[in-house]
Amino acid sequence: MSSKTGAIDVSYVAQLARLELDEAEKAAMQHDMEAIVEYIDELSELDVSGVEPTAHAVQVTNVERDDVARPGFGRDVMLANAPALIEGELIRVPQVLPGEGMN
Amino acid sequence: MSVMETITIAAAARLLAEKKLTSVELVNRCLSRVDETDGRVGAFLTIDRERVLAAAAESDRRRAAGTALSEFDGVPIGVKACIVAGKESCSCASKLLENVISPYDSTAVARLRRLGFIPFGRLNMDEFAMGSSCENSAFHRTANPWDLNRVPGGSSGGSAAAVAARMVPAALGSDTGGSIRQPAGFCGIVGVKPTYGRVSRYGLVAFASSLDQIGPMTNSVEDAGIVLDAICGRDAADSTSLDVPAGGFADAVRKADVASLKGVRVGLPKEYLEAPGLSPDVKSALGRALEKIRSLGAETVEVSLPHTKYAVAVYYIIATAEASANLARFDGVRYGARKDTGELVSSYFASRGAGFGREVTRRILLGTYVLSSGYYDAYYLRAQKVRTLIRRDFTEAFRQCDVLLTPVTPATAFKFGEKSDPLQMYLSDIFTIALNLSGNCGMSVPYALGGDGMPIGLQVIAPALEEKRLLAFGRVLEANAERESFVPGL
């Protein structure tokens, strides 16, 4: 693994992460990320051939439960945190498809 | 010394049982202590006073009727803002979730309530638990009760400050890379990171799911055992919670012989003593502690954790990768602050851009980068492999000793703004981070004061699921610490 420093395209990464950044923020993030990536690049000096990756500190196996219906929290409780509602029972979302909307 | 300066859960339970104290009196004392000190400290984000007082009155009625839920019925406990409690804010100290009210209790909070503990307020933290100083809260900073110009540590800085300042007898924190142990060390309290899987994560807003763990932050090791007894155990709502015998932790603390460590082998990782930035004060406190435990009969052995220098890099790859996935759910559609641009996808960008603070943004970007096409193998997969090597280091070390004793942090609490470079901030986690990766349990115990008058904590590390050994050793350390109690002159 060679050093990726300088090759970070912050605009592209922000697109992937769906984050809006202004130019000043992008420049600051570019600077910070390059320093951090340079630091984490030190892992490349280790020989990890033949080493199994660890995803969880404790070995866990898949856990199954019976597929039975259980009561939930209730519609009103869950809708109480919605940013906008339609007639108190549907979540109003920003327009999904281009063209004339319902708004 | 006032009652609030000595109160612990155990002491409160005794006073409640002897009818020398009511829960309403106890809660009112906590509220007055908050009024007296929290304007300067800033530990709490919110406290629903009516609700905690109503819960206290109910507890007193139960006790009078002989139907107390447990000996701890009526004892308040603070809760970090990312551990949800029903009908309370779950802001995680983020603007994005500022107005979100949790519809349910996390399992840890539900289990405390079942014993009559009263969840008391929402405690400040670094936004989404990302930070080591509490400076990343979107709302206000929290000061260290020992010196208001210094940070309380993070990310559970509000929890540590509230417990140290005796606003509450105890609090819950969460620890992903040291977020319980580091602020506990900075504020002179006890903090325990249990074994991964010991405590259910249901209702803990996820930062890095393979590392996060809820744990106690208290003013005594016995209290830490009491809280761990209350919250541990298998939970059907968290498939990673372990189905193993649980409980008996407080008893293990009470049974510890504080005058003898005969037969106990204590390991000292040599790489920790050679770590850059280790202050002479912290090194000297550790040296004095070693002399002390040898005088109690312990055998000390030098051990090696050869991959220590890679732990911070591994952590900041794995934790940010997991965070970038976990925080993808916050889009301002079903809950949270929405910036509506009139179109869905650009609303995601705008809501997330405006809602997340700088450190959270930085970590989401880093996590997205290390997982992105072309970099996954070089960073994420490689980090998971080095994580295996770090786990093996601990397994090897524990062949030669029963517990490890290390510093919690390289130095005492730093001043606000002192670590403005993010990488310097990350490097201060060097001693706490490895055991989240390895899955061991660990704790911070206040041991001495530094030349600057700030508390110095020592970290005890035990193998996975050996919390009884961990806490018993922590109790001996506590009983032999250089001060009888650690109370800031606030």
Image (cartoon, coloured by chain):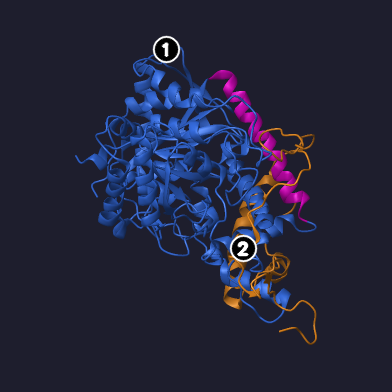
Chain colours: A orange, B blue
Give the residue drawn at x 56%, y 19%: B400
Q: Looking at the picture, how far across and down is residue B62, in whole percent?
A: 38, 38
Q: Are marks 1 and 2 in contact (CB under 8 Å)?
A: no
Q: Secondary structure at mark 2?
A: helix
At label 1, counting other C-alpha atoms closer than 10 Å, the crowd grade (few under 14, some 14-19, many 20 or more) is some
Chain letter of the residue carrying label 1: B
Q: Nearer the viewer, residue A24 or B443?
A: B443
Quickly name the residue at label 1: B262
Q: Is residue B15 above or below residue B237?
A: above
Disc 2 residue type (three-letter): Asp
Q: Looking at the picture, how far across and down is residue B423, in whole percent?
A: 54, 55
Q: Are marks 1 and 2 on the same chain?
A: no
Disc 1 residue type (three-letter): Lys
Is B380 covered by the magenta stretch? yes
SS majority, magenta: helix
Chain letter of the residue carrying label 2: A
Residue lying furthest left: B1
Visible in this render: residue B60? yes
Part of the protein shown in magenta = B375-401
Label 1 or label 2, whichever lies nearer to me, is: 2
Residue lying furthest top: B263
Visible in this render: residue B280? no
